[in-house]
Amino acid sequence: QVRLVESGGDSVQAGGSLRLSCAASGVSGGTYSRFSLGWFRQPPGKERDGVVSIDSDGQASYADSVKGRFTVSRDNAKNTVYLEMNSLEPEDTAMYYCAASIVTLSWWARLRESYYNYWGQGTQVTVSS
């Protein structure tokens, strides 16, 4: 059973930075390295949306709203994916979830949650103005 656990969420002032982590267990390193990984977020009262994905080759796809501010990376040796968030805005306030897909996703599927098989429980990010 693959388990994903996010950490790093916090309350920060606008303009600040945070680094989220998502550690996977119940999966071998070799299998994890083949996962497509994604970060999604759900603001209060809104639907969950894709933020960024990174495939097994390290290619990343970002939502327009976070381009230039957020950076995704993965460490397959640690079964962990990271989300570096800079220049945070109040609009970034949300519950952030990581997700894993067992298949390589086409570009049009990378930010769509229905294509992901495993999900974490989320970590809260709150940005105040």
Image: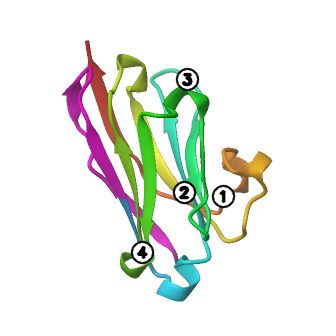
Residue identifier under label 1: 116
Secondary structure at numbered mark 1: loop
Give percent across and percent down for residue 69: 42, 34
Label located before the other in sequence (4 or 3): 3
Query: Mark 1 near mark 3, Cβ–Cβ under 8 Å?
Result: no
Could one spot residue 88 in this view of the protein?
yes
Residue identifier under label 3: 46
Query: Mark 1 near mark 2, Cβ–Cβ under 8 Å?
Result: yes
Q: Is residue 41 above or below residue 2?
A: above
**CA separation, marks 1 and 2?**
6 Å
Give percent across and percent down for residue 45: 51, 20
Three-letter amino acid code of the residue under disc 4: Asn
Label located before the other in sequence (4 or 2): 4
Three-letter amino acid code of the residue under disc 2: Ala
**CA separation, marks 4 and 2?**
13 Å
Label located before the other in sequence (1 or 3): 3
* Residues drawn in magenta: 2-21
Q: Residue furthest front?
A: 68
**CA separation, marks 2 and 3?**
19 Å
Q: Is residue 35 above or below residue 8?
A: below
Residue identifier under label 4: 79
Residue identifier under label 2: 99
Label located before the other in sequence (1 or 4): 4
- Report the mark closest to the observer, 4 or 2: 4
Could one spot residue 28 in this view of the protein?
no
- Specify the quadrant of the image occupied by residue 124: top left
Q: Magenta span has 3?
A: yes
